[in-house]
Structure formats: structure tokens, C-alpha cells
Amino acid sequence: MTTPRAHHRRRAGCAIVRITAVALTVWLQASWVTAQKLTLAVTPSTVSFASADPDTTPTILAAPITVSVRVQSNSGAWHLTVQANGDLLSGGATIDATQVSWTAAPPPFQNGTLSKVAAQPIASGTGNVNPAINGSVVFRLANSWNYSAGIYSQTIVFTLSAP
Amino acid sequence: MRIRSVIVAAVFIGAAQASPALAQPQSATATMTVSVSTSAKLTISSSTLTFADANPDLVPQIAPAQGALSITAKARATDNAQVVLTVQADDDLRSGLQVIPASAITWTASGTGFASGTLSKTAPVTLGQWIGSGSRTGSQTLAFRNLWTYATGTYTCVLLYTLSGP
């Protein structure tokens, strides 16, 4: 014969066990769901434009770079963008970032023009990209006599996101 | 209590399955470099100038048969550096032993940065002057001072145009 207090304790114990079991189940379920994974690589990590006569070479091409994109466990859209951290700088001299454009292939990679103000789309899609796709990107500089002599540099940032 | 637990569990499980963990955006950087070397390019519309004979009383200043020279001076210089276009005669105008001073040739110019002047064989004379890189276009209209004192003959000299920066 149990007292009301003992009975109450046993019921409380059962409730705690039940809640623990439920919590464990939820944790296991949540862990079982595969986490979304985004992988981005850019090689090489340098883009160089050689000096050239603007009359004979109005557009200077840099060597192609490879942009590798992999998207896993994704059911929505994904986007790859590129943005310059600023204009190209050489001391006090500048070349506007918008003087740089690019051609990219194959689809879903796309052509565009660089900006320091806003991230520009360079590839996009939906769902997974697995195995990874490699885009060949050729940056192009509009050559001009107006550029001051010097060595200019700037960092450009590729960003892969989903959604 | 049991029903409540099952419901709570279902809600948690449903939420976990409907919203898989989203990955943080991935970034990669590249360094962009542009090399711009100093350079200059000068274009003149004609490489010869011919001043025809004329009556000094009627034509005291003879214009060349080619008309005004069109000049394009393109230069890449360091930031805020001075770019200068000069012209100099290699000698006086000569026809055998006869001489007409190079200073008999003068010019007027049009175009931003272009200036009028008088030819010299002893020193380059500034025809244009600018700050920094750029492509500049102007014209130079030369004239030959016609005098009765010149001995007859065909006189020649060479004009050297020089575009320079630092």
C-alpha cells in the first residue's frame, strides 16, 4: 500500500523519464537531418592585368581563373556573387572597379561587370550541385590612356549563399 | 500527460525536419592587380610641310600647303606628373649656303593645353603641356614669315616633335 505522497513521486518520475525520452528522440531526429553544406573555391587567387597599349589592346584579358561551387542538402535557391572591396588603387590614383568585367562559362556561370557598391551575380541555381561544378572566369579590363602609371590592386570577394 | 508529450515531440520533430540547418555563406577572395606602365604616343597628320613661294607684299605670312597639323598626344604618366610636347628645328632653313633663321617659322595652336610659339634651333619650344595621363588632340597652324631679303632657292630643315613625361 503506497501512500499518496509516494504515488505522486512515482508519477513525477515517470513524467521525467518520458520527457527525457521525447527530448532524446527529438535530438536524434534533428541530428539525423543532414545539414546544408556550401563549398566554394577560387584558383588561382590572383587576377593580373599586364600593361598594354590602349590603341592596340582596348581590352586587357587576365588569365582565366576557376571558380568551384558545390551545394549539398539544399532544397532552395543558391547564389554566387562577386564584389570588389573598392576601386583599384595605386597610391592616390584609382581605376574604377566598373572598368572590370568578366566572361564566365559554362552555365549557370554568367557574364557581368564588377562593382564596389553591390555584389554582382556570377552564378545561381536551385537545389544541389553535387559533384561540384567548375566555372572558367576571364576578367577583362577596359584599357585607357587616362590611367596613371602604377601598380594597382584590390581584393575581390566571391560569396556563395543559400537561400 | 502522455498525449501532451507526443504532441510536443511531434512538433519538435516536424520543426527539425522542415528546417534543416542552413549553412553560412561561403566566401573566397582573389587579389586583382593592374600594371600600367609609362608610355607616350604622338601622332601628327603630316610629316612634311611645304611653304610655296609668294609675293612678300601680298603674302607676308605663308601658310603651309598641308594646312594645319592635327596633333594627338597620348601619354601615361605617374599621377599628377607633367607631360610636355615640344618642337625644335635641327637647324636653320638652308638652301646651299643660303640661310633663313628657324625663327622665321611661327605657329598658333588650338586645343586644351596647346600653345603658340616660335621655332628655334637652339632649344625645344613648348607646344603643349598637361598634367597626368590622357589623350589630347589639338592643331598647330604654322606660318612662314615672307621677306624680300631671302635669296632664291629651296630651303629645308627638320622639325623634331617630342612628347615626354617623368
Image: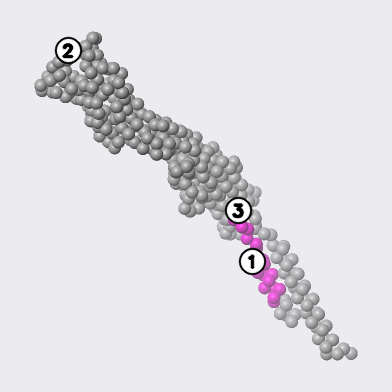
Q: Amino acid at mark 1?
A: Ala
Tag 3 residue? B26
Q: Are marks 3 and 1 in contact (CB under 8 Å)?
A: no
The magenta stretch is: B7-25
Q: Amino acid at mark 3?
A: Gln
Q: Amino acid at mark 2?
A: Ala
Chain of residue at mark 1: B
Residue A4, percent from left and from top: 83, 90
> First in sequence: mark 3 or mark 2?
3
Q: Residue furthest front?
A: B122
In terms of image quadrants, where is residue B58? top left
* Left or right of A125 in this view: B112: left
Q: Is residue B6 above or below residue B26?
A: below
Mark 1 to mark 2: distance in Å? 104 Å
Chain of residue at mark 3: B
Tag 1 residue? B18
The residue closer to the viewer here, B70 or A78, is B70
Q: Residue at x 56, y 52 (%)?
A: A159
Tag 2 residue? B151
SS at circle 3: strand
> First in sequence: mark 3 or mark 1?
1
